[in-house]
Structure formats: C-alpha cells, structure tokens
C-alpha cells in the first residue's frame, strides 16, 4: 500500500514476539504521550527488552512509527474493501458498507492516526507517508467510480480522480469530526448522511437508490436544489 520497506520478518517465534511487543509498546506510548515525548528506552522498557534489542528490529523511532502507521493503514484499507461481498451493480449498498467500515476502522485507530497527523504537519517524511496512504484510497475510489460510470450508474461527466479525491477528503474529515460528541449522530445516522451525500454527489442513478426510481429521483433533486 505504501513505499515503506520494513525489515525482514523474524525467522523465529521468539523474534516475532519481540518485534510484536515493540510495535505494541511503541503504539501505546505514542498514543499516551505523543511522538516527541517518547524515547527508545521507554519503548524497550514497555516491551520488556533491552535498549540494544530495539535496534535489532528498527533503526530509529521514526522507523517504528512508520511501520505502526503502515500496519494501521493496511488494516483500514482491508476493512473497507467490499470486493465480492456485494454485487458490482449494488452501488448504494457498496457505498454504504464502505462508509460504515471506514467510520469503524478510523474510530478504532483514531489515536495513532492523530499521532501521524501531528508528525505529518512538521516532518516531510511523514507528510509523504500520509499522502501515500491517501493515494491508495483515492485510487480505489476512482476505480469504483469508473466501474459505476461504465454500468450507467454514475454521472459519466464526472472526472474520476478529482471526484474520488473530494469525496475521500469529505469522508476522512467527517470520520474524525464525528467522534466529537457535539455532532450528536449515532453510527447509523452518520453512515446515512455520508452515503446520501456520496450517492448524490456522483449522480447515482435513481434506480440504484433504496426504494428505486421515485426515491432516488427525489433524493437527487433535493441534494441539488
């Protein structure tokens, strides 16, 4: 998903346990204290290993955070991949399922994602990592939109990349804002809002909306008034 190049996987069960413990310890400490406040000694101590053992698996604290975030991004990407779970022409249901999975995944990983954002704002390497992660989602969204256009289910005049970028940014921003209690939406309401906005924005064909032509036409007209 990204250009990050983790080191070779541990050859032994003990090595796998040690590396996993370092990743878990690093994630916990970064979430609790922030990236800058965490030292390698603290990570090693939390993982129950020596300072030198840390460098067996990671060459720096930045490398540790990069691998943690890369794993999180892969988890979110996999969780939101609808694949063959729903048929290609079930456009509204596919959008809805992807939005629900994305909200849940971002909520699950919200604290470490905030750590990434804090570093991406001040470090070029982490800014590039965040862009790489976003690009993978944009590409998938673009491919999905093209398929819907080919099936006659979405506005054929929409530029796929720009549309996928804009809608992806909307969902990503909302996923973080939604966790603030002031929004006052439960999961079902949040998914409904995102899905209706997304479907309306791509000009989803009326027959593809729940309730068929009449409901879809009314929803599309309301969104574009």
Image: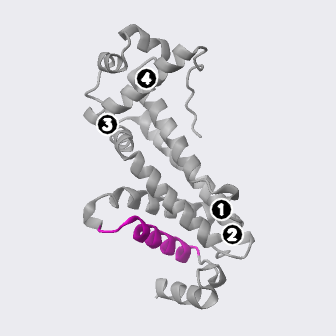
Q: Earlier in the sequence, mark 3 or mark 4?
A: 4
**Does dot 2 land on a helix, a strand or a loop?**
helix
Task: Tell me which corner region of the image, top left, top right, bottom left or bottom right, holds residue 112.
Answer: top left
Q: Earlier in the sequence, mark 2 or mark 4?
A: 4
- Residue 47 numbered tag: none
Mark 1 and 2 residues: CB-CB less than 8 Å, in contact? yes
Tell me residue 154's x, y (percent): 65, 74
Q: CA distance from mark 1 to mark 3?
A: 34 Å
Main SS class of the magenta portion in the image: helix
Q: CA distance from mark 1 to mark 2?
A: 6 Å
Tell me residue 214's x, y (percent): 59, 91
Q: Bounds of the magenta span? A: 184-202
Quick one: 162 or 176, which is closer to the camera?
176
Tell me residue 188's x, y (percent): 43, 68
**Does dot 3 land on a helix, a strand or a loop?**
helix
Quick one: 120 or 68, which is closer to the camera?
68
Q: CA distance from mark 2 to mark 3?
A: 39 Å
Question: Which residue is label 2 attached to?
Answer: 148
Question: Which residue is label 4 attached to?
Answer: 21
């Amino acid at each position: 998903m990204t250009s990050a190049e983790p080191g070779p996987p541990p050859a032994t069960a003990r090595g796998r346990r040690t590396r996993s413990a370092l990743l878990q310890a690093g994630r916990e400490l970064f979430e609790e204290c922030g990236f800058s406040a965490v030292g390698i000694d603290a990570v090693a101590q939390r993982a129950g290993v020596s300072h030198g053992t840390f460098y067996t698996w990671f060459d720096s604290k930045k490398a540790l955070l990069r691998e943690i975030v890369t794993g999180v991004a892969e988890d979110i990407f996999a969780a939101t991949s609808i694949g063959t779970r729903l048929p290609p022409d079930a456009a509204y249901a596919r959008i809805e399922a992807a939005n629900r999975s994305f909200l849940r995944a971002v909520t699950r990983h919200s604290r470490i994602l905030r750590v990434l954002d804090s570093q991406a704002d001040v470090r070029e390497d982490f800014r590039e990592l965040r862009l790489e992660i976003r690009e993978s989602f944009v590409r998938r969204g673009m491919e999905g939109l093209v398929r819907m256009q080919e099936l006659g289910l979405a506005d054929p005049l929409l530029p796929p990349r720009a549309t996928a970028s804009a809608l992806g940014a909307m969902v990503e921003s909302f996923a973080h804002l939604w966790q603030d209690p002031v929004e006052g939406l439960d999961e079902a309401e949040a998914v409904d809002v995102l899905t209706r906005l997304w479907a309306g924005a791509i000009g989803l064909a009326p027959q593809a909306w729940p309730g068929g032509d009449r409901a879809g036409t009314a929803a599309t007209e309301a969104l574009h008034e």
